[in-house]
Image: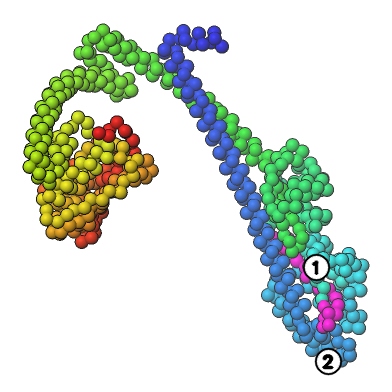
């Protein structure tokens, strides 16, 4: 393993790329060929099975239709009150009555058979020897006393017994027909639950099982009908010879595979020959119909398809390998030019321009490298300019702090003079104004705690109440643990100022401003509520548009309204924390205005002053 790695490392880049590309091409080609063959095989099998299932369902439908015909005809006979009463009469009947009965009965039966032409024969066997036979419909049951179905009539599970495939026995000696029929036998009861005999309704096997006999012409498959897991009737003897299995062995195999299931599909091997078994159950005749089809020809076709795919894949692999070798050699030639230019940059020469042209990836790499060098030189220039601007900003900030400190000291002196003269209201106002100025003019940091911002707002409200004849109350609903949370400086005060100027002041009377804060999904939510005059719907819509747009012209048009102040705060929050944070506003004209600020939940105790 180690020797293989060492020998691989000794390969040149061109050899490594060629070998790698060949493997990279070979694996997808092989996988694609395997996937394609799998899909072809799967689709072929699914279509084959679907077709066989559909054929079997059609046969099942035909059988149920024929069963319904037999049941309907038998029900007509079994419910013919006049017929049953006439046959069961004890006081006998004269010739005229019998002739009238015969004509009526024959007419009804002929009409019944005419409307159901699929019925081959209909016969009624009665247990009265004194009742004359009416050929070919009514016979004495002594004609069938030794027939299996009649002997076992007491053992029938139901009133009906089916014999699926047998030779029809005519009682007319002159009739030599030996048709294979499927027959339904039904017990007939007269008035008072008196047993009168049995009804026989026969259909030709070819008619009863429909297309089943037609499909057996295909030597690739056959049909089996197994009744009560005992008797099996197989159609397609050539198929048995082809797969080399006896009928009894096939019956046992089919019953075992079905395993008492209603229907299903199985792929199995009989004498190492693949076959598909599709089966379904028909309850009225207590039978299961099996369709057994050899898929040997389908497997052979799939094998030929597989071999063709292997040849195509191998040919494609050879072609791709040759193309890969050619293009790799060309690409590496251009790469050498790029490497030489990079060595010049490494030596300190930033004015290198790689002379590679074209539209391929290597040319794009060369162009990107040239752009990168231009960008590096540009960034170096920008860094120098930023350093100069940073120094100038520091000087201006120092100057601003000096002015703020001077003004604050002056206000402190005036406050002391007011206290000495006993003018305490003026002293308190100056105290609030001094704190206000110190907070607003000191920008050593642009992040503050929520507690500092609320203290600044409290001083602002005190000064506002001196200005107006009425009082504006500010209520805080903020948990103490949230006072250390980080927010942008001067982000809540502009909202409060808007509430005073645009909400409460136009009312000409006092009002309430309520500030609420809570945590929601790792976000700090601060809500400023005022009971002022609210905002008109059209103005509210414009405000929301201002907050949602980045169009500078829209901001300029609203610079004399509350929109520009809200927009500035919203932009500062987004720049500081991200686009998912910011401001939302809601208002009902004449009732309230509610502004919600969303910050990330950051606890920074060092921010507290």
Q: Residue at x 89, y 87 (%)?
A: 90
Between 422 and 376, the residue placed more toward the observer is 422
- Segment tinted magenta in the rendering: 189-210
Residue 61 drawn above or below residue 108: above
Residue name at image x 29 percent, y 31 percent: 606
Q: Is residue 603 found left or right of 505 in the rendered image?
A: right
- Residue 407: quadrant of the picture: top left
Q: Is residue 380 above or below residue 539?
A: above
Asked if marks 1 and 2 touch (Cβ < 8 Å), the reply is no
For the residues labelled 1 and 2, the Cα–Cα distance comes to 38 Å
Residue 457: image quadrant is top left
Residue at left offset 24%, top offset 38%: 452
Q: 10 Å neighbourhood of mark 2: few (<14), some, or many (≥20)? A: few
Q: Is residue 114 magenta?
A: no
Find residue 233 and report its horizontal and vertical position in percent. Answer: 79, 55
Q: In screen coordinates, is 191 left or right of 56? A: right
Q: Is residue 301 visible?
A: yes
Which numbered disc flags the more N-terminal residue, 1 or 2? 2
Residue holding disc 2: 96
The residue under the point 80% across, 60% down is 165
Q: Quadrant of residue 420?
A: top left
The foreground one among 315 and 396 is: 396
Membership of 196 in magenta stretch: yes
Quadrant (top left, top right, bottom left, bottom right) of the N terminus = top right
How crowded pointer 1 is (Cα within 10 Å; few <14, some 14-19, many 20+) is rated as: few
Task: Give residue 254's position: percent from left, percent from top.
Answer: 76, 48
Mark seen at residue 158: 1
Location of the C terminus (image quadrant)? top left
Q: Position of residue 462 (x, y in %)?
A: 17, 47
């Amino acid at each position: 393993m180690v020797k293989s790695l060492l020998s691989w490392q000794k390969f040149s880049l061109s050899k490594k790329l060629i070998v790698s590309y060949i493997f990279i091409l070979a694996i997808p080609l092989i996988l694609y060929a395997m996937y394609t063959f799998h899909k072809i095989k799967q689709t072929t099998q699914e279509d084959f099975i679907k077709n066989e299932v559909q054929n079997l369902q059609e046969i099942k439908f035909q059988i149920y239709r024929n069963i319904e015909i037999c049941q309907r005809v038998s029900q007509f006979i079994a419910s013919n009150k006049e017929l049953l009463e006439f046959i069961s009469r004890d006081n006998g009947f004269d010739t005229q009555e019998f002739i009238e009965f015969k004509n009526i009965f024959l007419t009804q039966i002929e009409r019944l058979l005419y409307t159901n032409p699929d019925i081959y024969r209909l016969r009624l066997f009665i247990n009265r020897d004194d009742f004359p036979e009416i050929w070919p419909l009514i016979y004495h049951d002594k004609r069938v006393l030794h027939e299996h179905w009649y002997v076992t009539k007491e053992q029938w599970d139901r009133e009906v017994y089916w014999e699926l495939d047998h030779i029809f026995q005519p009682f007319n000696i002159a009739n030599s027909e030996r048709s294979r029929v499927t027959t339904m036998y039904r017990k007939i009861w007269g008035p008072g639950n008196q047993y009168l005999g049995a009804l026989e309704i026969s259909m030709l096997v070819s008619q009863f099982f429909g297309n089943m006999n037609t499909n057996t012409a295909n030597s690739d498959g056959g049909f089996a009908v197994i009744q009560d897991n005992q008797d099996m009737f197989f159609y397609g003897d050539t198929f048995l010879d082809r797969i080399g299995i006896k009928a009894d062995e096939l019956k046992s195999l089919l019953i075992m595979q079905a395993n008492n299931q209603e229907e299903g599909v199985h792929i199995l091997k009989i004498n190492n020959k693949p076959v598909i078994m599709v089966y379904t159950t028909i309850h009225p005749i207590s039978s299961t119909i099996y369709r057994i089809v050899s898929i040997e020809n389908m497997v052979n076709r799939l094998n030929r398809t597989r071999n063709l795919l292997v040849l195509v894949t191998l040919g494609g692999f050879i072609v791709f390998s040759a193309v890969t070798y050619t293009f790799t050699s060309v690409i590496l030639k251009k790469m050498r030019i790029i490497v030489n230019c990079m060595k010049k940059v490494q030596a300190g020469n930033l004015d290198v321009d790689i002379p590679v042209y074209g539209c391929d990836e290597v040319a794009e790499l060369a162009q990107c490298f040239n752009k990168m060098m231009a960008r590096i030189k540009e960034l170096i220039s920008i860094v120098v300019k930023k350093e100069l601007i940073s120094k100038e900003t520091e000087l201006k900030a120092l100057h601003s702090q000096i002015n703020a400190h001077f003004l604050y000291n002056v206000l402190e002196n005036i406050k002391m003079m007011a206290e000495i003269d006993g003018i305490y209201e003026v002293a308190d106002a100056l105290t609030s104004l001094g704190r206000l100025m110190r907070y607003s003019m000191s920008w050593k940091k642009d992040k503050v705690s929520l507690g500092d911002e609320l203290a600044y707002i409290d001083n602002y409200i005190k000064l506002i109440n001196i200005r107006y004849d009425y009082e504006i109350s500010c209520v805080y609903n903020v948990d103490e643990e949230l006072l250390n949370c980080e927010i942008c400086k001067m982000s809540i005060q502009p909202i409060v100022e808007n509430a005073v100027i645009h909400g409460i002041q136009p009312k000409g009377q006092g009002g309430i401003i309520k500030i609420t804060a809570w945590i929601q999904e790792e976000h700090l939510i601060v809500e400023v509520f005022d009971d002022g005059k609210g905002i008109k719907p059209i103005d509210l819509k414009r405000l929301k548009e201002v907050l949602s747009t980045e169009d500078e012209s829209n901001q300029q048009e609203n610079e004399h309204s509350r929109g520009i102040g809200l927009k500035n705060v919203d932009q500062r929050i987004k720049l500081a924390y991200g686009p998912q944070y910011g401001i939302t506003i809601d208002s009902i004209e004449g009732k309230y205005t509610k502004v919600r600020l969303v910050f990330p939940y950051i606890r920074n105790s060092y921010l507290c002053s």
